[in-house]
Image (cartoon, rainbow, N blue to C red):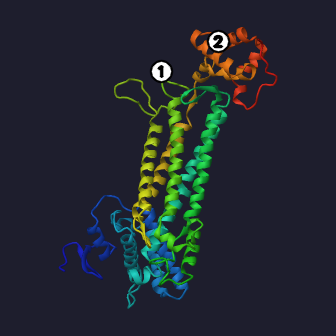
């Protein structure tokens, strides 16, 4: 093969390839670049860094086990460390839509680390090999699933869980701040019995609490990894102590509970853990969707809608309607929710690609799960900072409460459901008040009605003692 300008000749088991002169990868990576001209999507840098961390840990363990030459091993450790630091991020050009095992990316990491290792070693007869040395005790079929798990777990722990924790804290603060605001509750988007606005926000805060718990469960589950299974789960060509020892290093470096799975054939033949994590992230997204939509409804108007909340004004809302302010921060979050739901559908489809001993949809599943986590973390953080922190209650909720018909629910213990319904209907058609009609038709006293129709009392559990009616 004739060498062309600005390239060098590299060789793999299929022959020679022209590779960009300054590239740290080799022939097999270049073949993958040419084979998959599909998109602009790539594995995220975080994934590459964790994959390089596996190579670094593997070199340490293989040296300790007496399987890897110490001079080569030390150079691999140093070279992999530079990849982990991001020094070679531009040398991982392979399209996301590649071989379904992610073998091309595993090879890409092996080649970059090996070439940098050769630079770091003094000239001599030793020549570090991408497969023989960097990939010792490993296969794409167990390392790619391992990196997929750990990239998602790290993003959950360090990005999405903290964002939810801060949102929960802000919502709890708002619940306390708005506790004394009593307004009309709504079920089926229709008037219901009174509720404190603080109780609504308490509900939102609890959604974030339960969301964090669900995700923390997934962080723990994702720490169980396929490493040690090598090609098909049998562990061929890996020392029996290899995976356990590498996982111990990964635990220390990542701050995650990383351990070798006892279920190797399941771990490589399925994506059940990724699917469960994606489902949990989707659940969190839908929780945030409920909160964002409620806040949009409560701030709608301000005059022709509910107008019970006032949101921070962050930008003009219309190019044609002067003075219009829209809930754009909530809308931004809601669009991310749509993306997360779509990503979850992709992960679900990918999880169905587990045939026999290997699932062959690892890249697309790992990418979509990681994107869901990072997008939702960023959007939640932005929603908390630019919307939740600055929202305020207006007087609309308490003002409307006085006109609400569902206060008639408070009459039920005294006069019964049917009679209370009749009072509410007559009040609606005549414009007369519940109090006036209850006194006239059922002989209830002002003292009784002050208790029965007290909206604050209705925001608590309990029944009015001795609530007897008149005629």
Q: Is residue 355 above or below residue 307?
A: below
Which of the pair 397/447 is nearer the observer? Answer: 447
Q: Position of residue 199 (x, y in %)?
A: 65, 34
Q: Is residue 301 above or below residue 367?
A: above
Q: Quadrant of residue 441?
A: top right
Quadrant of the drawing holding the C terminus:
top right
Residue at the (66%, 14%) spot, across then down:
434
Q: Which mark is residue 39?
A: none
Q: Position of residue 286 (x, y in %)?
A: 51, 45
The residue identified by callout 2 is 433
Q: Which mark is residue 304?
A: 1
Q: Quadrant of residue 110?
A: bottom left
Whether residue 123 is visible to the viewer of this picture, yes or no, is yes
Residue at the (67%, 35%) spot, across then down:
176
Numbered disc 2: secondary structure: loop
**Is 375 left or right of 41, judged from the image as shown?**
right
Residue at the (48%, 49%) spot, across then down:
376
Quadrant of the drawing holding the N terminus:
bottom left
Q: Position of residue 146 (x, y in %)?
A: 49, 69
Q: Position of residue 438 (x, y in %)?
A: 70, 13
The crowd level at tag 2 (other Cα within 10 Å; few <14, some 14-19, many 20+) is some
**Is 415 left or right of 172, judged from the image as shown?**
right
Whether residue 51 is visible to the viewer of this picture, yes or no, is no
Decide which of tag 1 and tag 2 comes sooner along the chain.
1
In whole angstroms, how far apart are the C-alphas of marks 1 and 2?
24 Å
């Amino acid at each position: 093969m004739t060498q062309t300008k600005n390239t060098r000749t590299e060789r793999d088991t299929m022959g020679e390839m022209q590779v960009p002169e300054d590239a740290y990868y080799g022939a097999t990576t270049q073949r993958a670049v040419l084979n998959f001209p599909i998109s602009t999507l790539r594995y995220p840098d975080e994934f590459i860094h964790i994959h390089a961390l596996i190579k670094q840990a593997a070199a340490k363990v293989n040296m300790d086990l007496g399987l890897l030459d110490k001079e080569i091993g030390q150079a691999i450790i140093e070279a992999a460390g530079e990849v982990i630091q991001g020094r070679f991020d531009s040398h991982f050009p392979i399209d996301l839509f590649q071989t379904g095992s992610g073998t091309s990316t595993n090879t890409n990491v092996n080649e970059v680390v090996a070439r940098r290792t050769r630079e770091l070693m003094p000239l001599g007869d030793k020549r570090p090999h991408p497969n023989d040395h960097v990939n010792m005790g490993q296969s794409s079929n167990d390392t790619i699933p391992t990196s997929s798990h750990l990239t998602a777990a790290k993003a959950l722990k360090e990005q999405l869980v903290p964002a939810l924790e801060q949102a929960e804290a802000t919502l709890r603060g708002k619940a306390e701040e708005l506790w004394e605001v009593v307004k009309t509750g709504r079920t089926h988007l229709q008037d219901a019995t009174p509720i404190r606005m603080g109780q609504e926000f308490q509900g939102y805060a609890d959604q974030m609490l339960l969301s964090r718990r669900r995700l923390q469960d997934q962080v723990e589950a994702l720490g169980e990894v396929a490493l040690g299974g090598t090609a098909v789960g049998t562990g061929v060509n890996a020392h029996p102590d290899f995976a356990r020892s590498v996982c111990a290093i990964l635990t220390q470096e990542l701050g995650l509970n990383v351990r070798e799975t006892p279920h190797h054939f399941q771990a490589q033949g399925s994506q059940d853990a990724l699917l469960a994590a994606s489902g949990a992230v989707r659940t969190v997204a839908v929780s945030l969707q409920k909160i964002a939509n409620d806040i949009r409804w409560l701030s709608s108007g301000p005059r022709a809608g509910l107008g019970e909340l006032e949101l921070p004004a962050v930008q003009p809302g219309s190019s044609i309607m002067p003075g219009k302010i829209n809930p754009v921060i909530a809308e931004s979050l809601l669009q991310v929710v749509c993306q997360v739901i779509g990503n979850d559908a992709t992960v679900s489809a990918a999880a169905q690609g587990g045939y026999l001993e290997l699932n062959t949809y690892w890249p697309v599943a790992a990418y979509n799960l990681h994107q869901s986590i990072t997008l939702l973390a960023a959007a939640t953080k932005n929603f908390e900072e630019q919307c939740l922190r600055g929202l305020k209650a207006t007087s609309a909720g308490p003002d409307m409460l006085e006109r609400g018909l569902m206060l008639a629910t408070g009459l039920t213990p005294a006069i019964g459901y049917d009679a209370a319904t009749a009072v509410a209907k007559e009040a609606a058609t005549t414009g007369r008040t519940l109090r006036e009609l209850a006194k006239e038709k059922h002989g209830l006293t002002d003292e009784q009605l002050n208790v029965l129709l007290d909206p604050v009392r209705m925001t608590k559990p309990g029944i009015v003692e001795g609530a007897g009616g008149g005629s």
